[in-house]
Image (cartoon, grey):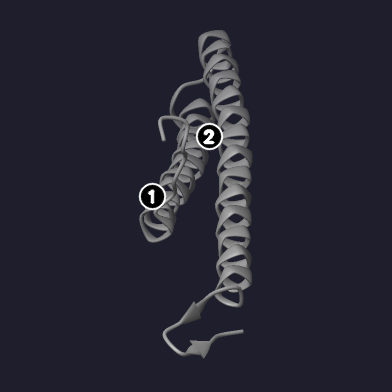
Amino acid sequence: MGNTVGIKYQEAEVEIEKLEKAIEDLYTNVELIDKNTNEISKDTWVGKDADAYQEKILGYSDKLKKQTDSFKELVEKLKDVVAEFKAEEEKSATKMSGEFSYGNEYYV
């Protein structure tokens, strides 16, 4: 039994929802960083230093967005795996229920 892998589907779905919420928050924060950076660079602070600041910060936010995109892809794959395992388990349970008799009755 040391090599057995199990999934508690309801718990997995709750954790996946938390991950999806975290991803949404990351996207929101990246948008906020971009918006604030652009506002500061255009309205408050101008010149070469402002341009360099804007370029640097927007570069970091692009990297963060790409990492968030990768995180989202990973969560989607995780959802697929959980759904696949759940469907396979339900299929096996349905198949097994037709193979056993209980008492004097045979269930198919």
Dot 2 crowding, Cα within 10 Å, few <14, some 14–19, many 20+? some
Across and down, in percent, residue 20 comes to 47, 50
Q: Is residue 107 above or below residue 88?
A: below
Above or below residue 11? Residue 62 is: above
Please provide percent x and percent y for residue 53: 51, 14
What residue sits right under mark 2 in the picture?
34
Badge 1 element = helix
Q: Going 63% across and 44% down the picture, which residue do you hit?
A: 77
Q: Which of marks 2 and 1 is nearer the N terminus?
A: 1
Q: Residue at x 57, y 51 (%)?
A: 79
**Quadrant (top left/top right/bottom left/bottom right) for the N terminus:** top left
Query: Disc 1 residue type?
Result: Glu
What type is the residue that disc 2 sits on?
Asp
Left or right: 55 in relation to 44: right
Say which of marks 2 and 1 sits in front: 1
Q: Which mark is residue 15?
A: 1
Of the pair 24 and 91, the residue shown nearer to us: 91
**Among the 4 quarters of the image, the one containing residue 66:** top right
